[in-house]
Image (cartoon, rainbow, N blue to C red):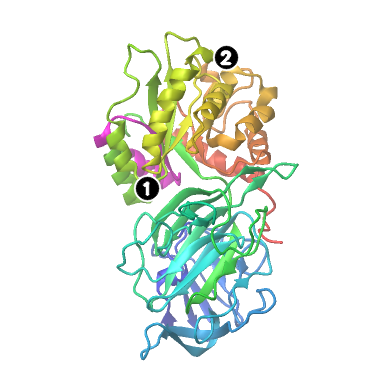
Amino acid sequence: MTARRAECCHGRCAVRGTYRIHYRKGKEEKDMELHGKTVGAILLSVGVFCLVSPMGTGIQDARGSQTGRVYLTGDDLSTWQGNTGQWQIVGDVFMNLQNESLLSSKPGAGVALNGPTGRTVNLLSKKEFGDVKAHIEFMVPKGSNSGVYFMGRYEIQVFDSWQKTSEYPGIECGGIYQRWDENKEPKGFEGHSPRVNASRPPGQWQNFDVIFRAPRFDENGRKIANARFEKIVHNGVVIHEDVELTGPTRASAYEDEKPAGPLMLQGDHGPVAYRNIWIEPAGANPFFAMDTATKDAKHQTAKEQVDMLKELEYEGIGTGYEGCAKLAEMLGELDKSGLRLFSIYLGVNLDPDQQKYDPTLKDAMKILSGRNTILWVFVQSRAHKPSTPEGDARAVEIICEIADMAAEAGVRVALYPHYGFWLERVEDAVRVAEKANRENVGVTFNLCHWLRVDDENNLKPLLKLAMPRLFVVTINGADSGGKDWKQLIQTLDRGSFDLPGFLITLKSCGYTGPVGFQGYGIGGDAYENLKRSVDAWHRISQKSLPERESAK
């Protein structure tokens, strides 16, 4: 019996809580959960894989429609379009002992190799995909280069980056490759380096686990949301989170953007091999908790809060800014648990006799560099009443100052409408964001604050207004027509407001970003409130998902 290393059959991946390893002996295959619990074993006919559900629902046929999973590598090249050039199916590959810039192979099935020299055509899948989770395993020899293009347009770079420094953003293995314009100087732009170099030596198998969101378009075909890599994990290490792409990257198969497209493997830049490529529906938006919901007598420290969120399968936290030391402590705990800091809550004051914002923010940006965290900015003033445009000029001045500082660290700014504050309504946030005119400045939609100041019938027009700049949404259970926070902020399983309908409307407007749980003032046991809410999220978010089939 031979066993593949865990990461080769996906190990700890972007699919929360999924750990598995495949064992094969002849026609027999077994699945084992890596936490130490054997979850299933079954005899299968040749070529059929097993998959273990992370929720413990048993073994399902990975080629069947129960999961929506599509395999693109296997016994032949039948899943790829047209002329496949010199691509061939082999059983295994390894670095050529006489020439380390080439790959050698063994007969068999399961591995796609781009010919003897690595100079052949690109492969494009027959099926087209939109929002997906994808698992991709690859091997390059010394100095080689390839790429995986989602929708044939947006590239994750495959490169021999072992112990190498970067030449430019996006060239590294796991980099999101740059866009290109001959009329610009420099011509290459919007490349994104991985947070860390997670590469293995050439001649070793590596893997990507990716959650990707396709661009969104309105009924007239106008793009209302950019394509986005929600998460990229390279060899078990998170290297990108929530990176938007304003258009196709260089050397893509298409220059336009559409709701769906094929997966493309670059075949003409050098020897490369791929195996175990599968794609399945991306699932619901990432869901996190605000620290208004995570603190009680038992959960005061960053570790106590993060451990609880990890156990309950939240994807991270949004927290208030309390200085650099607290920020570093929280990030340390989140990194150890594989969770994410989605947002930081920061106040701005427009009045000239008041401190405009925390002066330690510049140092905080250094700590946040490369994380693409959202800076939640609420805006107050005694001199200006809520929503009055007389404060716009001062607000824009301060917001631009913060945004330019944040841009250097790869941080975005989302204006935070808050009942009773100068920036009170979503319309206020959109107005100020448009005047600021910075790519990294957007808005937040806070359900409880919106319900406090607006008519529920205005939801869809307001979301459409915000949509081009909508970075994050917060939700909670609420009573329709509620007048105070006890009625307007409840756990997700409570209240008469139609949350499933809200999420369906949100999706119909093209939103694909993170959703946070607001728990201000609910009181009681934080663990119980968070558990009730995440359980409700799993139920209601499923109602807003598209059909399970991820391809057409």
Location of residue 447 with respect to 335 vertically, above or below: above
* Residue at horizontal 54 percent and vertical 42 percent from the top: 513
Earlier in the chain: of badge 1 and badge 2, it is: 1
Question: Which one is in front, 39 or 197?
Answer: 197
The quadrant where residue 463 appears: top right
Query: Which residue, given by chain and number where applicable, does mark 1 sit on?
Result: 370
In the rendered structure, find residue 483 and report the number of the disc placed on it: 2
Decide: few, some or many residues near mark 1? Use Cα within 10 Å; few <14, some 14-19, many ≥20: many
User: As shown in the figure, which amino acid type bears the numbered disc 2?
Assistant: Lys
Q: Position of residue 440 (x, y in %)?
A: 47, 38
Residue located 64% across and 69% down the image: 125
Query: Is 315 one of the magenta-colored residues?
Result: yes
Q: Is residue 2 left or right of residue 66?
A: left
Does residue 344 show up?
no
Picture coordinates of residue 467, whole percent (x, y): 61, 35
> Where 523 sits versus 362, above or below?
above
Specify whether 365 is left or right of 285: left
Q: Position of residue 392 (x, y in %)?
A: 49, 18
Q: Which residues are magenta?
A: 303-326
